[in-house]
Structures are given as C-alpha cells and as structure tokens.
C-alpha cells in the first residue's frame, strides 16, 4: 500500500505540475484565413473546368472557362461597325481634299483675274477721265469757234477743224466709257466668281462636321468594345494565389449566374490552429508561447508551434443569438477565448481545414 501510495502521489504530482505548466484544451481546430470561394462575374455555361479537388494550382492558372462565343460575336460586330465608319471617314477626307484642290486652283485663278480686272478698270478709268477732260475742252473750243464763225471773225477752215476735234474727242470719250463699263463688268464678274467659290468652300466645313460626328461614333463604339473585351476576360477564372482546390461547386456544362460559387481555393501555407481556450486557463499565456498540437486523425503525429495572437473578445461575443440574462435567470459559464497558433514543425501535408485535435501551451 505504501508503494502504491507513493506511485499514486508521484503521478498525481506530475499531473498537477503538468496542468500548472501547460494550458490544455481539446477545442482546437485547423483553420485558414485564405479559403476563397471563386466565382465568375458574368453569366454563362461552363465549357472547361480543369482542376480536381486536392490538386495544386499556381497564381494565374486558368481554373475554369465559360462559353464566350456570344461575347466574341458582339466584339466582331462592333469592330465591323468601326471599320465601316473609318471607311466613311476616309472617303469624306478624300472628297474634301479633292474639293480643296479644285476650288483652291479656281480661287487662285479667280483672284488673279480680279487683280487684272481691277488693273484694267483703273487704266480705263484714267483713260475715261482724260477723254472727258479732252471732250469738255473741245466742246468749249467748238462753241467759241461757232460764235466767232457766225460773226465772221473766224475762218471756215478753223471752224471745221474745231468741229473735227470735237467729233474726235467725243468718239474717244464714248470709247473710253465703253472700255470702263467692260472693265467694271469684268471686275464684278471676277468678284462674283470668288464669292461663289468661297461659298462652295463652305461645303468642306460641312464635311468636317460629318467627319467629327463619325469620329465621335467610332470612339463611342470603341469604348463599348473595350467594355465587352473586359467581359471577355471575365469568362476565364484565374487562381488568385498559389494553393489547393478544396471543393468544386459546379461541373462542365453547368449554366451558372454571376457570383455563383464554382471553386473553393485554399492558399498554400495559410493553415493555423485555432484554440478555444477557457478563460480560466489564460494565465501565463502570451504571444510567442510554445505549443504542441496533435490531430485526432493522426494521434501519433506531433506538431510544434507558437502563439501568434490572443483574441480581445470571447467567442460568445460574436454569437448570432447572444444569451439573454435580463430575466434574472443566470448560470455562470466559463467563456472561451480564441487563441491562434502558428505551426512551425510537423507533417504539414496531413493538415486539413476543419480537422480537430488537442493542444497544450507552455505557460510563461
């Protein structure tokens, strides 16, 4: 009995000492902060889904695709519209160049004609002024000669000479007047031609307006094409990070809606152990405290780790339906505080999200 008592006391001492030195809990579970549920941003039918559950993927790998033929046809139609508009713009620019070249040459010629007409008009005007002065002078001389001739003070020959000079100056004045009218008519015609050509030049402004309108249409359609191409990119589902496929929610041939889950992806090296530690066991537990973890599925395997965080709130604080103690009926329950442990050693390939086990944390 003494030996039995001594053995009992020895093991009791070890058990008590172990409980004092370590915080022990069976409420330990494998968790991950990077368990992402992937989905498409557009509706469609799945035509390809590559990875199987448990397979490893790399960031950027194409995991699934949906039928993009309808979107591609929209892009083709829009691109054909843009090409047609660009062809119209090309034709309008060619027409504008032709008009500018033709009217430009005619306008230069008309401007030259106008300069010549104005020069001729100026010469004719001077000739008319000179002829008019000469006519007026000959007219005065004729009246004086006629008066003297009637009085017998001027020989007939001089009178006839004055009459001839008057006739010549009158013919010269009539000729200068006709030339001036012709020169003025030519100047008016040249100015009218220039006005008509400038009016036709306004057609190019209308062409510019049409070109601007078509370019605006083309820009709007190109924006639509960019948006459609963005949708086209969304028909492929890429892996956002390196990891493992945890679950498939759909299969090839399924028609899905935007946002509907397709795959669940677990990030590589993102697993940790969450311990719901009783509040009475928190004494001596600090960030950095060493911990030992065993899986229920593999009790012979040991994982080493350390505490990386202690929650500032109990698990019950986040309950959807918190306890109502306002009625006065109150039963004191030991609360549990989530403690996160980062595993540093052990067969990590055995870990699965959601697995349970037991953990002991060395108090400091």
Image (spheres, grey):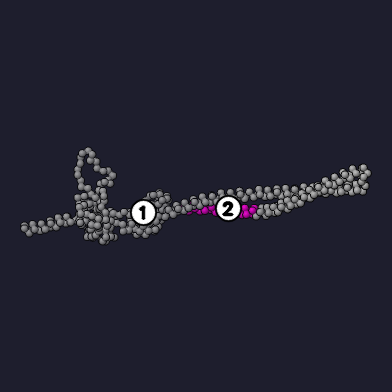
Q: Main secondary structure of the magenta part?
A: helix
Q: Which residues make up the magenta segment?
A: 71-100
- Residue in the picture at 85% in, 45% down: 140
- Name the spot of residue 212 as percent of width and height, x first: 56, 50
- Provide residue 189's location: percent of width, then percent of height: 72, 48
Q: Residues within 10 Å of mark 1 (few under 14, many from 20)?
A: many
**Is residue 303 rendered to the left or right of residue 122?**
left
First along the sequence among labels 1 and 2 = 2
Neighbours of disc 2 within 10 Å: few (<14), some (14-19), many (20+):
many
Kindly give the residue lying farthest to the front in the view shown: 153
Q: Nearer the viewer, residue 262 or 124?
A: 124
Q: Position of residue 323 (x, y in %)?
A: 24, 42
| Marking on residue 73 | none
Residue under numbered circle 2: 89
- Residue 355 appears in view: no
Disc 1 is placed on an element classified as strand
Q: Residue at x 92, y 48 (%)?
A: 157
73 with respect to 312 (left or right): right
Horizontal side of 152 relative to 131 (left or right) equals right
Is residue 97 rendered magenta in the image? yes
Q: For mark 1, what is the residue?
A: 263
**Residue at image location 64% in from the left, 53% down from the top:** 100
The image quadrant where one finds the N terminus is: bottom left
Under circle 2, the secondary element is helix
């Amino acid at each position: 009995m003494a030996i039995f008592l001594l053995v009992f006391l020895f093991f009791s001492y070890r058990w008590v000492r172990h409980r004092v030195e370590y915080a022990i809990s069976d409420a330990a579970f494998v968790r991950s902060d990077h368990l992402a549920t992937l989905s498409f941003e557009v509706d469609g039918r799945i035509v390809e889904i590559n990875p199987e559950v448990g397979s490893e993927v790399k960031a950027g790998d194409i995991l699934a695709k949906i039928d993009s033929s309808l979107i591609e046809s929209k892009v083709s139609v829009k691109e054909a519209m843009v090409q047609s508009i660009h062809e119209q713009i090309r034709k309008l620019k060619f027409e504008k160049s032709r008009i500018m070249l033709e009217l430009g040459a005619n306008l230069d010629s008309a401007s030259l004609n106008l300069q010549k007409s104005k020069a001729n008009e100026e010469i004719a005007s001077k000739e008319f002024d000179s002829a008019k002065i000469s006519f007026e002078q000959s007219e005065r001389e004729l009246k004086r000669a006629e008066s003297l001739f009637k009085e017998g003070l001027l020989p007939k020959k001089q009178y006839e000479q004055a009459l001839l000079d008057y006739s010549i100056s009158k013919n010269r004045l009539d000729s200068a007047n006709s030339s001036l009218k012709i020169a003025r008519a030519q100047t008016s015609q040249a100015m009218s031609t220039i006005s008509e050509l400038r009016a036709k030049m306004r057609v190019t402004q209308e062409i510019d307006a049409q070109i601007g309108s078509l370019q605006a249409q083309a820009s709007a359609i190109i924006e639509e094409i960019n948006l459609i191409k963005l949708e086209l990119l969304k028909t492929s589902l890429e892996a956002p990070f390196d990891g493992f496929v945890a679950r498939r929610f759909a299969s090839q041939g399924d028609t899905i809606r935007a946002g509907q889950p397709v795959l669940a992806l677990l990030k590589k090296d993102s697993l940790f152990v969450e311990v719901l530690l009783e509040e009475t066991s928190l004494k001596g537990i600090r960030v950095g405290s060493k911990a030992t973890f065993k899986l229920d599925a593999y009790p012979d395997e040991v994982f080493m780790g350390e505490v990386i965080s202690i929650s500032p709130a109990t698990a019950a604080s986040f309950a959807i339906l918190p306890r109502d103690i306002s009625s006065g009926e109150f039963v004191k329950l030991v609360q549990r505080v989530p403690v996160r442990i980062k595993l540093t050693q052990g067969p990590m390939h055995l870990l699965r999200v959601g697995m349970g086990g037991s953990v002991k944390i060395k108090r400091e």
